[in-house]
């Protein structure tokens, strides 16, 4: 029925300059592509399939470090959190999208000849649903787009992702994704569907996720009341000084949190894991994009 093609775009981000002061960053391979009059289409992510079992994490993951094993530590974290403290992070993500609290748009710039597509993410700041399709005012967050041509093409780039904001609306910082793989299936009119896999800066990821998680469990305890069984379990796990409040420092110092949020991918090949992988499925519907530089 629908025109459908598949694009596998692989975006490997440059190592951070702070870590490699003496090395010139590699040029973005997409820079060598012939210039082209591209057709732009933009889609706002309205549904995210967040893996909450280890098999879903495997299906939605990617082997970022080429060791033959699928990487999706983020998916494993979400399923572990659900089992350990009955906090539904997948539900929280969908609530944030449904309430228009997080605006992530996937932008496709398609070139007809030669045949390639640039894929980038933008951070929406205002969604106006009185138009059809809705108008989205957005800011760029992608320094280098991913490039896909029929099948799979890997290119370097940089982008950012709202990991914290998807869990708790007050944690608004978007963090650096050191690598991003976008596997998009195109459909006419209704939008696009696919998978998005990223490797996140470890320090930013730890800071953001612990803050979002601490806010989320604190909200949940408030909601349930301190006498509730689930609330008691959460307090037993994280309220180390037993003052009845789970502070951010208690979450960050917790050994369970530290072992779950560990880095799982060695991006620079020095034998030490330095980044955290995550993979999700998504559906995105067309928007009329206005970019604010
Ligand atoms: Ca791997
Ligand atoms: Ca405490
Ligand atoms: Ca390393």
Image (tube, rainbow, N blue to C red):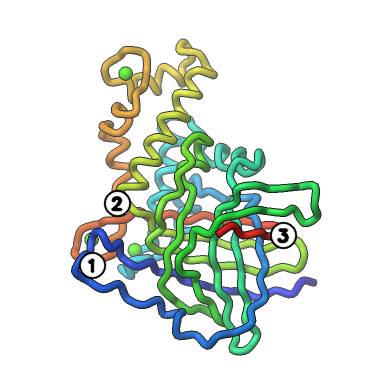
Q: Is residue 35 left or right of residue 255?
A: right
Whole-number angstrom distance, CA of label 1 to CA of label 3: 41 Å
Crowd tier of the residue under label 1, counting other residues whose Cα lies within 10 Å: few below 14, some 14–19, many 20 or above? few
Mark 2 packing: few (<14 Cα in 10 Å), some, or many (20+)?
Answer: many
Asked if disc 1 and disc 3 are in contact, CB closer than 8 Å, the reply is no
Say whether residue 56 is left or right of residue 272: right
Q: Are marks 2 and 1 in contact (CB under 8 Å)?
A: no
77 in relation to 218, above or below = below
Give above or below for 31 relative to 65.
below
User: Which residue is identified by label 1?
Assistant: 269
Report the front residue among 188 and 50: 188
Q: Is residue 1 visible?
A: yes
Figure quarter occupied by ligand 2: top left
The image shows residue 236 at horizontal and vertical percentages of: 34, 20
Q: Nearer the viewer, residue 66 or 117?
A: 117
Marks 2 and 1 sit apart, C-alpha to C-alpha, by: 13 Å
Count of numbered tags: 3
Q: Position of residue 156 (x, y in %)?
A: 41, 72
Q: Is mark 1 within 8 Å of ligand 3?
A: yes
Q: Which residue is mark 2?
A: 263
| SS class, disc 2 | loop
Q: Is residue 237 visible?
A: no
Query: Which mark is first along the chain, 1 or 2?
Result: 2
Nearer-N-terminus badge (2/3): 2
Residue at position x 65%, y 53% from top?
137
Residue at left 45%, top 19%?
231
Considering the numbered disc 3 on the image, is that residue within a helix, a strand or a loop?
strand
Q: Give the position of the N terminus as an image quadrant.
A: bottom right
Rendered location of residue 220, percent (x, y): 50, 24
Observer-nearest of 219 and 120: 120
Q: Residue beneath label 3, please?
A: 288
Q: Please name which of the two marks, 2 or 3, marks the residue nearer to the observer.
A: 3
């Amino acid at each position: 029925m629908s025109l459908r093609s598949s694009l596998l775009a692989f975006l490997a981000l440059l190592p951070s300059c702070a870590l490699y002061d003496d090395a010139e960053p590699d040029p973005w391979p997409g820079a060598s592509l012939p210039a082209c009059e591209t057709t732009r289409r933009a889609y706002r992510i309205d549904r995210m399939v967040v893996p909450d079992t280890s098999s879903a994490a495997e299906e939605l993951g990617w082997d970022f470090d080429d060791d033959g094993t699928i990487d999706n530590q983020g998916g494993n974290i979400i399923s572990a959190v659900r089992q350990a403290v009955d906090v539904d992070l997948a539900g929280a993500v969908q609530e944030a999208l449904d309430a228009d609290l997080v605006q992530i748009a996937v932008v496709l710039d398609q070139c007809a000849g030669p045949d390639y597509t640039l894929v980038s993410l933008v951070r929406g700041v205002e969604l106006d649903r009185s138009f059809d399709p809705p108008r989205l005012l957005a800011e760029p967050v992608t320094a280098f787009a991913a490039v896909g041509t029929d099948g799979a093409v890997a290119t370097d780039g940089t982008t950012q992702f709202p990991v914290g904001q998807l869990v708790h609306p007050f944690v608004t910082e978007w963090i650096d994704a050191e690598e991003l793989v976008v596997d998009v299936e195109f459909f006419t009119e209704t939008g696009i569907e696919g998978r998005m896999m990223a490797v996140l800066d470890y320090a930013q990821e730890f800071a953001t996720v612990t803050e979002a998680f601490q806010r989320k469990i604190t909200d949940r305890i408030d909601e349930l009341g301190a006498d509730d069984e689930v609330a008691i379990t959460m307090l037993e796990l994280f309220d180390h000084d037993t003052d009845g409040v789970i502070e951010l420092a208690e979450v960050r110092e917790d050994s369970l949190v530290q072992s779950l949020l560990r880095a799982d991918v060695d991006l620079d090949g020095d034998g030490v894991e330095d980044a955290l992988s995550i993979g999700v499925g998504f559906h995105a519907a067309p928007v009329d994009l206005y970019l604010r530089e």
